[in-house]
Image (cartoon, helix red, strand yellow):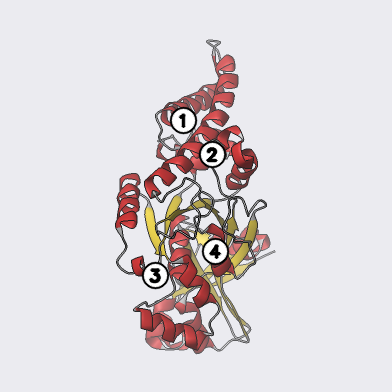
Amino acid sequence: MPLNCGIVGLPNVGKSTIFNALTSAKAQAANYPFCTIDPNTGVVTVPDERLRKISDLIKPKSLVPTTMEFIDIAGLVEGASKGEGLGNQFLGHIRATDAVCHVVRCFDDPEVVHVAGGVNPLHDIDIINTELLLADLDTVDKRHAKVEKLNKPANADHKIKAEFAALSKLKEALEAGKPARTVDLTDEEKPYTRDLFLITAKPQLYVANVDESGLLTGNAYTEAVEKRAAEENSQVVRICGALESEIAQLEPAERTEFLESLGLKEPGLDRLIHSAYRLLDLITYFTAGVQEVRAWTIRRGTKAPGAAGVIHSDFEKGFIKADCYASADLFKYGSEQAVKEAGLLRSEGKEYVVKDGDILFFKFNV
């Protein structure tokens, strides 16, 4: 299953418009709050020019890109953590995601209703972030109270003490308005918080939805969002949702010409996908042969057996070694044989940490 990003924000900020363009799915987009109730899910291809280049040289029968999943979650409102606007249901959908793409409206348009009555991206960000913090605080408070009772005896179990320490750190941070991802937990404490599925522990990316005039240079609204993101050590991607909807309908040749006319090298949605990919600290490796050239997604730092396990669990269980070379070397020398002759094909063992762009051939024994 692909890793996923939940698209969140206030109602009417452009979440569904961006989702539709991103996935070519049919999420409902309309000019009124709560037009999205059930989450819409779409699997999107991760754009990677290296895959095409490898294919041009290997000439396989099929080509398979790697993917990510995006989930369009209904708009949150103030009071969502207390159940306002079906908030509990929507917050539950966010908990199931790996990362959060927070869409913020950064354009003026009297024809598009704003749920708060006016465009103020920082105010919008504060509403969403506060609701997410309150939802997490409620979760942590309940667990903290339960574990506190178990931790009172002087001879309390060591595991209970570690869990209580972790929960106390989280509780203190959330009460101070700081997201769970800022809390410095020890390696011993981390396992005791995973099953909490805290929303603010997830990495977050701001998506500034602008009009066409703000796409290249930004505007006062995007400047405010970028400043806030810098303070939080987060990223920002500027996207014109309306324009991306038009681009998504064009044929590839028309799309290239249209982007050039706008002074753009790639669609904003490609930048969003790449940013989300980096947000989750993901990299791509490739398998390449005459039958198939394929891209695979793994987390940065994954060792060779773990990378093999993404293909099939038997590959990981029976891992022997991986023959490996860099895709950059294939592009430089023009063929796999030339890479071998240059002495750049290596045999790597179980401790090898796979690098972005590696081409791997796994040898295993079932």
Mark number displayed over residue 287: none
Would residue 245 be seen by someone viewing this image from the given angle?
yes
What amino acid does circle 3 point to? Glu
Q: Nearer the viewer, mark 1 or mark 3?
A: 3
Residue 198, position as x, y percentages in the image = 54, 39
* Residue 108 or residue 73, whichever sits in front: 108
Would residue 344 be seen by someone viewing this image from the given angle?
no
Sequence-wise first label, 3 or 4: 4
Sequence-wise first label, 1 or 3: 1
- Around disc 2, counting alpha carbons within 10 Å, would you say few (fewer than 14), some (14 to 19), or many (20 or more)? many
* Tag 3 secondary structure: helix
- Around disc 1, counting alpha carbons within 10 Å, would you say few (fewer than 14), some (14 to 19), or many (20 or more)? many
Q: Residue at x 58, y 70 (%)?
A: 362
**Mark 1 touching mark 2, by CB under 8 A?**
yes
Badge 4 is on which residue? 17
Badge 3 is on which residue? 212
Residue furthest to the front in view is: 110
* Tag 4 secondary structure: helix
What amino acid does circle 4 point to? Thr
Residue 351, position as x, y percentages in the image = 48, 57
Badge 2 is on which residue? 198
